[in-house]
Amino acid sequence: MTLSEALAQQLSESQAGALLTMAPEHPEQASNADLTETPYTQLLESANQLRALHTGLLGKALAIRYTSLCDFVTALLAFDGWCSALYLLPNDSCPSLPPDCMYLSDTETGNNQQMIKPTKPVHTRWYLATSGTTDKPRWIGHNLAGLTHSIKHSDRLSGLVWGLVYQPFRFAGLQVLLQALLTQTRLVDASSGDISARLQRLQKGRVTAISATPTLWRQLLVSGQLSSLQLTQLTLGGEIADQGILDALADVFPQARIRHIYASTEAGVGFAVSDGKAGFPKAWLDQGYDNIRFKVDQHQHLWIKPATLAQSGISGRVDQQGYLDSEDLVEIKADRVLFLGRATGAINVGGNKVHPQQVEQVLLTLPDVMQARVYGQSSSVIGQLVAAQIVAAQGVDTSALKKQLLKHCMQRLQRHQIPARVQFVDKIDSNAAGKISRSSTNE
Amino acid sequence: MTANMTIEQQVRDAMIQVAEISDCQLVSEINNDTVLLQSGLDSLGFAMLVAQLEEDLGFDPFTQMAIAVYPSTFGDFVSIYQQYADQQQDGQ
């Protein structure tokens, strides 16, 4: 079933799902403007018209550039089940597209109302870009069934009003978008703008459900206005949810369902923990949970055995019992399994991944930097910050060098990749293999 | 000597320092009623401020509070640090 068919099927059940977005002509007055309501029925009609204008795209690969939420959803509805592939372009660095990939702007427009259903079904691959802060962004292919399999239907869920705070062309945002569409609930676009403009839209749209990173939740708490929302469902994902943020949110919304999500894309596993505590129950190591089995090895790596492995390419990394190393470090404390971070040393700054090696390489291009070690320092505000230890050349004025290297990093790295803390040391410990030890020295 | 500096002055100094390295532009006047989110620091800048103050003062009240109370103005922010510093003195 295509996205538009799935939506049309839901529409018959007398609900009034709609997108609530900013009036696109006055984005600069975003915080003052009222929300514009676009019913899903209207989006379906626009999608049919759009497809009729671009019938030549049948079976072709299409790149969709995000301009507004309404246009974006219309294009998804129009071309899922019509194009062979949909590439959802991110707004920053974009992996290269296949040569035959087309844009809406460069396809012929002919109005062919007769031919708006393909004669035989086209199975569309949806491509999402990994966030560009890792080594190199790349496309990950999905199909609609996979993207929507975690969407649940219930009376409680169809009574929610979702707030979209993630970018809709990323995995997490698309999940929220599809959840709202396919449960016929209202979706308020708060995916752009500063925090007070977003909050104003969430308030105006009477949002009751939000999925966001712990960092964004902390920002919403700092605004002092979070309690003006009537939230009944709060989801935390994309970063480790610590006990502090779970408690702070429970304090503001004592009656709400608060859950944090763990996802391992490689293992094709995602689960939600909703008991209000950080990590997950230790009992799951013995009993498993929701068809998933877990174990922890002597290096504190969490191994996961899903019911079925998502990707065939990782079969070589699966042990004899069918477990895959998630490369997430955990610690067992009392009756909980708590997440510590990535075994690879990847740093998670408010949901943005930073590879320490990449930052080290930039630091090492300065002649006065003899050795550099980059690691994650835990932050009560943003999860983790980038920290660096530097061995400077002999006799160098370290305070001048610190200024120089920060400027050097600013020109070459994204803001969140720049070391927030720089420490000059006499030597950097390496392990027996001569590799720099990557575990945090924060403790 | 930092001991002679008020907590508020240390917070102000740290803000200026952090704004520079985090590429943020602070608003021209910051007083007790300035809303933190409108001070010019974004969440990364704010995180760096808390980390810088931890280095300068030796504590981070946000990790150490049992239930996080989130400050919304500059005045709230300073008073959380002040309270924590006073408690530490009493405990000694």
Image (tube, coloured by chain):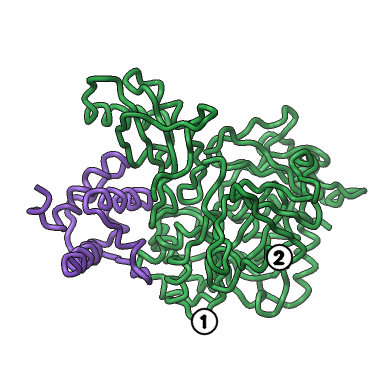
Chain colours: A green, B purple
Label ID, residue A286:
2
- A199 left or right, relative to A318: left
- Mark 1 or mark 2: name the one nearer the start of the chain: 1
- A373 left or right, relative to A266: left
Residue B3: x, y in percent? 10, 53
Image height of A406 relative to A123, above or below: above
Q: CA distance from mark 1 to mark 2?
A: 31 Å
Q: Do the CB atoms of the residues marked 1 and 2 lie less than 8 Å apart? A: no
A20 or A267, which is in the foreground?
A267
Residue B64: x, y in percent? 34, 64
Q: Amino acid at mark 2?
A: Asp
Residue name at image x 71 percent, y 65 percent: A286
- The mark closer to the camera, 1 or 2, is 2
SS state under label 2: helix
Label ID, residue B92:
none
A137 or A358, which is in the foreground?
A358
Image height of A285 relative to B42, above or below: below
Q: Chain of mark 1?
A: A
Q: Amino acid at mark 1?
A: Gln
- Pick out the residue farthest to the top: A367
Q: Which residue is mark 1?
A: A255
The answer to whether residue A176 shows anywhere in this view is yes
- B17 left or right, relative to A216: left
The answer to whether residue A42 shows anywhere in this view is no
**Quadrant of the rendered image containing residue A284:** bottom right
